[in-house]
Image (cartoon, rainbow, N blue to C red):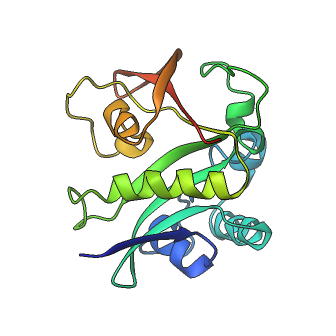
């Protein structure tokens, strides 16, 4: 198994991970809920969500994708915090005014889970942020203390995943997901 992680710049590859699985008109997340304002996010339905992702890709990478032997197997959303709703989030604190990037969604396709792909994706997000000049990257995983996290809520990652990638907890948050508190984890990139 050879895993490679690359910036997400091909719409078709992003759609493999985030797009509707059955009907092209389905109203799926497309990982836009944190990237857009609540108002814009709610206004986009069905195919308009995918078109918004296509527009964002035209401006540059919207995250990173993991590939195994050329097949898309995972996704991580990463962008400057200022371009996400985390810049205005009242439950997750803003620590300082640095040009922080954040990673908020890590997904691995069914059939590929449990093989360490999340680790590759998180490192790819770190690498992309560093290449784009970010001084710091943050994540907001759950602090599950080793307990099982429901797969539908595991997209934020776990504290241990981030610690293994060199992140340090710098703050508690008021956010809770699947009954677990979320913590603010940071890694300095300079």
Horizontally, residue 90 falls left or right of residue 68, namely right
- How many numbered dots are placed on residues in this image? 0
Whether residue 4 is visible to the viewer of this picture, yes or no, is yes
Image: 72 above or below 121: below
Image: 63 above or below 80: below
Snapshot quadrant of residue 108: bottom left
Residue 92: x %, y % from top left: 60, 22
Residue 26: x %, y % from top left: 53, 66
- In this view, the residue in front, 68 or 176, is 68
- In this view, the residue in front, 19 or 142, is 142
Snapshot quadrant of residue 62: bottom right
Image: 183 above or below 16: above
Residue 14: x %, y % from top left: 54, 71
Horizontally, residue 108 falls left or right of residue 90, namely left
- In this view, the residue in front, 11 or 171, is 171
Image: 139 above or below 30: above
Query: Could you tell me which residue is drawn at 32 percent across and 60 percent down?
Result: 117
Query: Could you tell me which residue is drawn at 54 percent across and 50 percent down?
Result: 126
Report the quarter where the C terminus lies: top right
- In this view, the residue in front, 125 or 71, is 125
Query: Could you tell me which residue is drawn at 50 percent across and 32 percent down?
Result: 140
Whether residue 29 is visible to the viewer of this picture, yes or no, is no
Residue 80: x %, y % from top left: 72, 45
Report the quarter where the N terminus lies: bottom left
């Amino acid at each position: 198994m050879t895993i490679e992680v690359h910036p997400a710049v091909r719409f078709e590859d992003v759609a493999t991970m985030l797009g509707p699985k059955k009907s092209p008109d389905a109203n799926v997340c497309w990982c836009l809920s944190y990237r857009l304002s609540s108002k814009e996010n709610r206004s986009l339905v069905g195919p308009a969500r995918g078109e918004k992702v296509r527009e964002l890709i035209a401006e540059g990478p919207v995250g990173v994708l993991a590939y195994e032997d050329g097949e898309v197997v995972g996704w991580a959303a990463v962008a400057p915090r200022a371009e996400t709703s985390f810049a205005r989030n009242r439950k997750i604190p803003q620590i300082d005014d640095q040009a922080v990037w954040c990673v908020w969604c890590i997904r691995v396709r069914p059939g590929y889970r449990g093989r360490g792909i999340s680790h590759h994706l998180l490192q790819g997000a770190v690498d992309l942020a560093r290449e784009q000049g970010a001084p710091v990257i943050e994540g907001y995983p759950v602090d599950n203390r080793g307990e099982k996290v429901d797969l539908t809520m595991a997209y934020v990652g776990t504290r241990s995943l981030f610690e293994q990638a060199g992140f340090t907890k710098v703050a508690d948050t008021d956010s809770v997901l699947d009954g677990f508190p979320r913590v603010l984890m940071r890694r300095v990139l300079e």
